[in-house]
Amino acid sequence: MTDTDKVAKAIQQVINTMMNRVMNKVLVEDPFIKEKHHSQKPLYAALVPDEIFKGSHFERRFVTPFGGVWEKLAQVVAKEAHGECATGHAITGTVGDERLRRIQEILNKLEHSQKGQDKSPPNWQMELAYIKAGQGNPIPVTVICDLFIRNTATNQCYAFELKGPLPNSDQTKVSKEKMFKLLAMEPAPVAGAFYALPYNPYGSNKQDYQWAFPKRWFDMCAGPCVLIGDEFWDFIGGNGTYAHFVNEVNQLGKGYRERIYREFLGMEPPPDADDFLLK
């Protein structure tokens, strides 16, 4: 089996496991029972078709188990390519107190306008150089990474803050602070720290990314510490990984959509059921 086949199989296994759990939940353990819905919410049932609430019943049971799907998928891909990968991994080291002060200074300038000045635009290289120029007394610091990879062949390690494609400002600020602290540790425990999004909802090019909130903290379109879509997947899995990922998701999606139409909604899939594809 080639490395590509191993990655494809790993992706299939994660998605199949999670989707089969959802299907068992909505078809066996906790199906939508219209009589129960009518009894509990007679006004809703009188005004709105049952199919609307049947859809929301499925959505609630789908969203929870898929909350950590990106981390799970990234983990299985990275293990095949690098050897070791952990989620929620804690790294402890020491950071000089002046470096910690400079980290807070930078974050404050990005978040708030200084008197008579506009807010500072993000510049990863300049910010990191400024932080590392500080020293001070060593302070113990622990950072929990969303994703931590160690390449067993080279022994190089990488840390990732992996967020959904439309992250809010607060969580992005926390991610940047964590990345700064990792790279400010002496010695640095990772060769690189990255802010990663699993796909770009605005297009195939990084320059197309438009969501405003993370742009306060990172140069999302050109920053070297930002990985979006194919950049991220190819980094953790090797060239072509994103294309294989998209292909596997679309192949699996066709079968599951047909099952959901027939087994859950009780109807034949419409002609355009397969029009939407992950790109």
Image: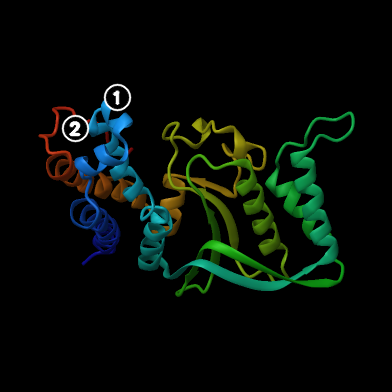
Tell me, for residue 273, which label it has, or none.
2
Q: Secondary structure at mark 2?
A: loop
Residue at 75% in and 41% down: 110
Residue 153 occupies quadrant: bottom left
Image quarter in which the N terminus is found: bottom left
Mark 2, other Cα within 10 Å: few <14 / some 14–19 / many ≥20: few
Tell me: 215 left or right of 47: right
257 and 184: which one is in front? Answer: 257
Mark 1, other Cα within 10 Å: few <14 / some 14–19 / many ≥20: few
Tell me: 4 left or right of 234: left
Q: Amino acid type of disc 1? A: Leu
Farthest-out residue, left: 268
Residue 133 visible in the shown view: no
Farthest-out residue, top: 47
Return the residue at label 1. Answer: 47
> How many numbered marks have been drawn onto this rendered protein structure?
2
Tell me: 227 left or right of 21: right
Residue at 29% in and 64% down: 3
